[in-house]
Amino acid sequence: MAAAAGEAAGGGGGSPSSARRRLRIISGHLRGSPRAPGRGALSPSPCKAQDGSAGPTSGSIPKKRQELLKWNGWGYNDSKFIFNKKGQAEFTGKRYRLGGMVLPTFKEWIEKTFGASLEHKTTSRASLNVNDVPPSIVNEEFLQDLRATKISYSQDAEDRVFRAHGHCLHEIFVLREGMFKRIPDIVVWPVCHEDVVKIVELACKHNLCIIPFGGGTSVSSALECPEEEKRTIVSLDTSQMNRILWIDEKNLTACVEAGIVGQDLEKQLAESGFCTGHEPDSMEFSSLGGWVATRASGMKKNIYGNIEDLVIHIKMVTPRGIVEKNCQVPRMSTGPDIHHFIMGSEGTLGVVTEVTIKIRPVPEYQKYGSVVFPNFERGVACLREVAKQRCAPASIRLVDNAQFQFGHALKPQVASIFTSFLDGLKKFYITKFKGFDPNILCVATLLFEGDREKVLQHEKQVYDIATKFGGLAAGEDNGQRGYMLTFVIAYLRDLGLDYYVIGESFETSVPWDRVLDLCRNVKERIVRECKEKGVQFAPLSTCRVTQTYDAGACVYFYFAFNYRGISDPIHVYEQIERAAREEILANGGSLSHHHGVGKLRKRWMKESISDVGLGMLRSVKEYVDPNNIFGNKNLL
Amino acid sequence: MKCYTPVIYKGLSPCKPNAIKSAVLHSEQVQYVIKQLAKEMGESPDIIQEEATEILDEMGHRMQLGAVRFFAFTLSKIFKQLFQRVCVNEEGMQRLQHAIQEHPVVLLPSHRSYVDFLMLSYLLYTYDLALPVIAAGIDFLGMKIVGELLRRAGAFFMRRSFGGNRLYWAVFAEYVKTMLRSGYAPIEFFLEGTRSRTAKTLTPKFGLLSIVMEPFFKREVFDTYLVPISISYERILEESLYAYELLGVPKPKESTSGLLKARRILSDNFGTIHIYVGQPVSLRTLASGRISRCPYNLVPRHLPQKPSEDIQEFVSDVAYKMELLQIENMVLSPWVLVAAVLLQNLPAMEFELLIEKTLWLKGLTQTFGGFIEWPDNLCAKKAVLSGLTLHSNIAGLVDGHVVLNDKGVEDGAVGEIVFRHALAVLMCATYRNQLLNVFVRPALVAVALQMAPSFRKEEVYSCFNFLRDVFSNEFIFFPGISLKDFEEGCFLLTKCDAIQTSQQEIYPTDKGSGTVSFLSAMFRPFVEGYQLIFRYLSKEMKEAFTEKQFIPGVRNFVFQLLEKGSTQCYEALSSDMQKNALSALVQLGAVKKKKIPSGFTYNVNQEAVSKILDMFGKYSLINLKRASQVINYFGQCTYVRCSDFS
């Protein structure tokens, strides 16, 4: 189960495209003409391959991922930031609302923030050099057995390299400039649960190492192959297991194959008028199995819950056999919940094949919003109050000043003089009339969802609270742009890489009373570490409070710097990232809220869950997978 | 009028002293303790809150620019009267200026005189830096107008002891932390806790330090700068007062009339003041890798929490480190060297010889890292003479010889003579003492060399270790690094050619015997004084006693010996040494200290004390006396082992 749910690797979470899609679905729904169910997806058929149907149907992501997705960067091949002939930033493609738009202030922002210059450019290799790729070493007997199962597989270099990494900075850097020391030897595409059972059996028989791969959006080094692994590494790509097996409208559940990616799941459920509401920022690419394997969190968890709240039943294939429950009930008291061994196991125990997940009717109405606060402190106090009153909208986020300015830089060219006049007026009102300092103020972005009436009521309640903390309503547009930022940020990193700017995001969860201290200290630590490590330009070090809970919040950091003049930027970057994590832990934050541990954060596991805790997890691993077939070395 | 616009902490949100008080009163920390106490005592929280308000009113400063200006004006007049010059390291002030903007700053000056904090505030004001709030003893409040004036100049007042009073502790700690967290002003306090009457750095107190470190431990601030500041006086304002006090003539209570009487000192000259503002030390850097973060993550931060052993140890280490930095940066005047030489050559010393030895000692001090301020191009003679002039109350030139000025009134009874002499010796010692912490490591090696039965390294080290333990209250040693201290001592002695070391042995060189003897003579008053005090304890104190009984008892004991002439160790009369010796025995387990309602009682384990006395071994009183004769012929004598004397 390739970790998938990284917000950092953010995709089109609350993107306009999803909003538009929903609208289309709703209107379709109202016309009362539900489309024909796709591909017989709603029949509980055992296995496509055995059906003799024409192999796996295509989801949004093809088997040959490189045909649609960048091989050395984030997202779709056709979508990227470029500087056009006039030297203005532009976003290409038609997939996103930002597509084809010119961003007039963006260049200036980049130059000002990073000291970067368009003249200093690095270029990635244009394509993969197949000769560099480590050879595929696969035992012939295993290949024979594999062929007998009729499960599709590939030993192609491109296929293998594509599944050798997630989207950590160092992984992308390697793709652009080097080559991984160890990559999978073979990629297999099971199309159903039974296929997975067969593959795991074969792996046990031939003593191979399996690394499950879902959406490939991991940001914890979870997909990297352990260099010292001598056995054949099988990358088990779940992408072809992407059907909705059934929908149970009475209980509002759906049983879904684990390889389905977020956007397909929502699209297909929407055809029946439902949704899961689980929208991690990477949902375009990340998979259901990956969400389960990393304990993912979605933007709208305030309404729908995180993955652990959504899951009703999990089926997982392990070397020891299949693990599942005997019923699909909302809760049971039968000892520790075995789901909690599976969720967050990061592919170390087995492959999740089928998940029964809660569904909800597609909401009638959706509305963005935003509030400006005079400073971050007031903003956090407001979010805390909202959490206390348990009236958080589907999503509520508070971005700090730097991120507010960042978002501002992504404002497209305005169409008319009138709008630009209005913008000026707004700015005047907030900064001059209300006395907000444009270099201190911060913005909360909001997303409301539900019945139209209730949404409007809810909206008023939240704005009333905000007013008490000095907040000023700042319109839907600002809110929407805030959410847009989270999905384009991953594309932005690729642009940055072209101009000596490297960056990454990381996250944590923290009790309410420590939120401010943690944000301030971590940002400061990053700035200092950069200085100490010889980074010549002050870094971008910014955060947002991105989720609220009763007892605390999830905080999300972006960190990027211009590495010109540094000989080993990745090493420096990693040192700083590590220091930032140390700082988080020292400030009472968690090791991870939803990105997971992978191999990147393993060193802090003992400190995080105690020796005994670690022993408990180890003993589960030892029982379930004594020969370490699932040998990706994550977590433990 | 001066335009005062200090640089301030970057994160500062300006507020009034009263706003701080109210923030403290309503803080979770204080409210928690109030509720707890209310529950325990069955009282209404309002009453306890009232009490807390009173504590705050008693404690809190009311810094006002007007008062500050008034002080600045008067102080500049007074200081000009009293002192010739005030020297400051400019780059230190600049570093401080940067530090103040960056993170909360804690100023840790040495404490030799009341002038310390007045001078420091005056200095910061002059340099346009944020004025500190200063932790002052509550006794100042006894001074009618002055107490309030100090309050307005930024002093806040702490009771001398409030260990048992939880409310007081909570309010006080929160008051300090609130000011620190908000970066309201640099916080200033004295690690030594009180003015050192002996000019020797006192062992640190940890209470306030641990309070100012806590916001960092809990990550309420990103970092905190600790700034060691060394203030040294060519002549200490309170010198005679201290000597009297050490001899048991009680310290006058702070009172305004007392201050007015002190006016007459205005006509006196107190020489130069040297202020060295040390490099700000980042607490974060000190703590990195030292502190496990767990304990603070698992309990809400506003709950009072007893610091873990780790933390306590760390606080203690930091305290010692800061004091060692104070010592390192302390400017030493030529007179300090003169005093050190003179004390070894009583009753009289030829002027020329004094000059020669002072010069020699200057070299040695510099080798050991002492920071001597020797006025440019000033020949040794002039330097010594100017010292003698400034300190004419202590020593003077008679017929080409330098003698202590201990005559006073016409010769009276024997007791009177002893007392007057002791007074002069203690005053003189105050200046020599400023050298001791610079010299202590090599000197204790030198003493150990004379104590040890052979030159074998282990044996010398074991003696050194013993001395270091015994004198752990007397001198400043970083905790737990005995071997390192020993090696440093050996290194410095080797550096000045006083000793040679082989694989197994350490032995004095012929050339260096003078140095070794000088060093051991320098510390002899302590070795001898401790032995006297231990002897008193092992012989005279069969029953439990209190400190109040102990001090006069031991003073009488020593006094009689001095009268009889069977010892020359006048410094054993110093109550400071007496107290230190007693607590050394407590630490060594030879004396049991028990808490009783009115204080502490002590119980001597005779056997253990005799054992410790034995440890001093051959380095007995008689030997010392003879050795001192040898050293009087310093310069000509060759090295003689102690054993040769017995």
Image (cartoon, coloured by chain):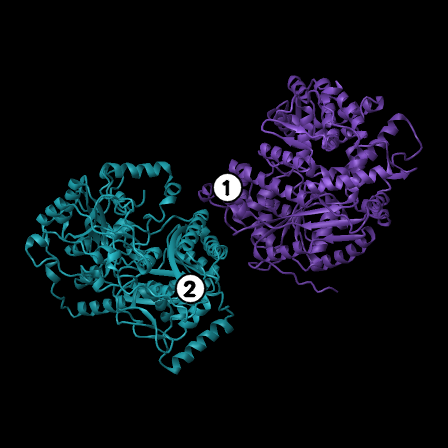
Chain colours: A cyan, B purple
Check disc 1 and give the amino acid type. Answer: Arg
Q: Which residue is under mark 2?
A: A403
Q: Quadrant of residue A559?
A: bottom left
Q: Secondary structure at mark 2?
A: helix
The answer to whether one can see residue B95 in this image is yes
- Residue B595 is situated, as x and y percent measured from the top left of the image, at 63, 27
Give the residue drawn at x 83%, y 35%: B424
Q: Quadrant of residue B471?
A: top right
Q: Quadrant of the N terminus of chain B?
A: bottom right
- Residue A544 is situated, as x and y percent measured from the top left of the image, at 41, 59
The residue closer to the viewer here, B387 or B289, is B387
Looking at the image, residue B198 sits to the left or right of residue A294; the answer is: right
Task: Report the chain holding disc 1.
Answer: B
Instruction: Give the vertical position of B386 relative to A217 (above or below).
Output: above
Task: Find the distance from the CA under tag 1 to the CA under tag 2.
Answer: 34 Å
Mark seen at residue B290: 1
Check disc 2 and give the amino acid type. Answer: Gln
Looking at the image, residue A299 sits to the left or right of residue B336; the answer is: left
The residue closer to the viewer here, A585 or B402, is B402
Badge 2: residue crowd in 10 Å (few <14, some 14–19, many ≥20): many
Instruction: Give the vertical position of A570 relative to B200 (above or below).
Output: below
Task: Report the chain holding disc 2.
Answer: A
Give the residue drawn at x 64%, y 22%: B590
